[in-house]
Amino acid sequence: MPQLAKRMGRAKPSAIMAVADKAKKLKSEGRDIVSFSIGVPNFLPGDHVYAAARDALAKDSGQYGSNRGSDALLDAFLQHIEALGLTGYTRMHCATGVGAKHILYNLAEALLDEGDTIAYATPYWTTYADIAEVLDARILELPCPASQDYKLSPAQLEVALATKPKVFLFNNPNNPTGMVYTREEIAALADVLVKYPDTWIITDDIYNMMVFDGLGYHNFVQARPELRDRLVFVDSLSKTYGMPGWRVGFMAGPEVVAKAITVLNSTHITNLPEVVTAAAVAALTGPQDVPVAKCAEFQAKRDLVVATMNAIPGVICPKPQGAFYVFPDISCAFGKSHNGVAIRNDVDFCSVLLEAKGVACVPGSAFGAPNALRISYTCPTAQLPVGLKRIEEFFAELA
Ligand SMILES: Cc1ncc(COP(=O)(O)O)c(C=O)c1O
């Protein structure tokens, strides 16, 4: 039998989905499972989004569309990013993709040759490593432990950029930590970035509308507009609008990069479907009450999760200010056991917690941070205290 390509030896299925699959299996066996695992928003977009999709279906042309994305969708995206404070972009600076994941993969293909280095802070979203590995790029991890609120410091960035990575990939608000950089922190990092013109900058900021405590969303180009020539902003409808399955992602950046993504679209997908495009335009330009209400709901849930986790002796739980994740350091449990089952590390912790208490979380090692676990708190509101109580009990039962 012929062999698969070598790169497939480096490709691996998402570690996050592995936990979700195990939880699903236990559920199908009749177990009462509370899922804090997969990062899905767990709400649906407003009615106007479905109405737009139905309307588009009724008028469907059945034709191929634009590789870059339809003019209406690009204009809707431009309007959206202007409201975020990213001004001066035109359609030629933008491109669409099948979710931000697809955009990020295409950006990596467009910007990295084999052996080039991509630098990013750890903890990181699992897919960053997966993409780099498939493309045979070198990874430069910049460790940001709980003791520094999981945030990258300007000094760390300076040391990393001095090694001239081809790409610096930044994620704010962050998955898995939920951390958000303040205006001042962004400005301080931007001051470092301007000194290293050989590095592309990608800001994967798909949770930009899920920021709490009035902190606001900030981007390096607002602090240092001269970064525009090499900074690519990535966005998505998945989390903000409750549309992960619709698969709509965007980028805004230098024209040459937007063109490269458009060319890759022509190779891979041709275009986003018409019905999806219509729904996406409606989400971006229609009433924003669903994302606004969800942001407030997530902030309240964040408060409950952080308070509960910090009340557990030994757990260190920095307070996130965005997205819908909390990332407590639970290493105090390592070396203990639960009902005789040893907990050596984060993977054991999550596995024993799921088996014993029916609560699914993702081990921090999936994000390069094996002292922690990720709690994604988008479950139905009534389930949140139930799952948290079980985690509290679990800790109390450790010996
Ligand atoms: C930081 C980050 N970037 C990108 C994505 C991918 O989003 P999409 O559904 O648009 O592919 C995710 C999804 O979990 C994410 O957390």
Image (cartoon, grey):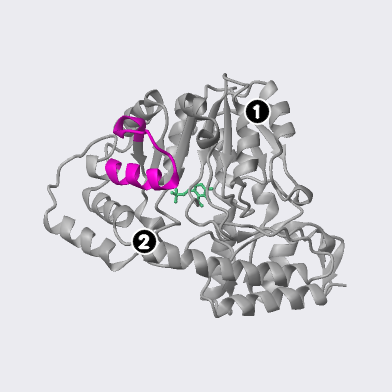
- How many numbered discs sit on the rendered protein? 2
Dot 1, how many residues are within 10 Å of its Cα: few (below 14), some (14-19), or many (20+)?
Answer: some
- In which quadrant of the rendered view does residue 397 lie? bottom right
The amino acid marked with disc number 2 is: Gln
Check if residue 270 falls in the magenta segment: no
Determine if residue 26 is in view.
yes
Q: State the mark number for residue 192.
A: 1
* Residue 41 image position (x, y, % from top left): 47, 63
Circle 1/circle 2 CB separation < 8 Å: no
Determine if residue 6 is in view.
no
Quadrant of the frame with the C terminus? bottom right
314 over 368 or under it: above or below: below
Principal secondary structure, stretch drawn in magenta: helix
- In which quadrant of the rendered view does residue 169 lie? top right
Question: Which residue bears the numbered disc 2?
Answer: 288
Q: Nearer the viewer, residue 83 or 4?
A: 83
- Under circle 2, the secondary element is loop
* Residue 159 image position (x, y, % from top left): 73, 27
Left or right position of 65 against 121: left
Range drawn in magenta: 74-94
- In which quadrant of the rendered view does residue 261 lie? top left
* Residue 185 image position (x, y, % from top left): 65, 41
* Residue 178 image position (x, y, % from top left): 61, 55
Closer to the chain start, of discs 1 and 2, is: 1
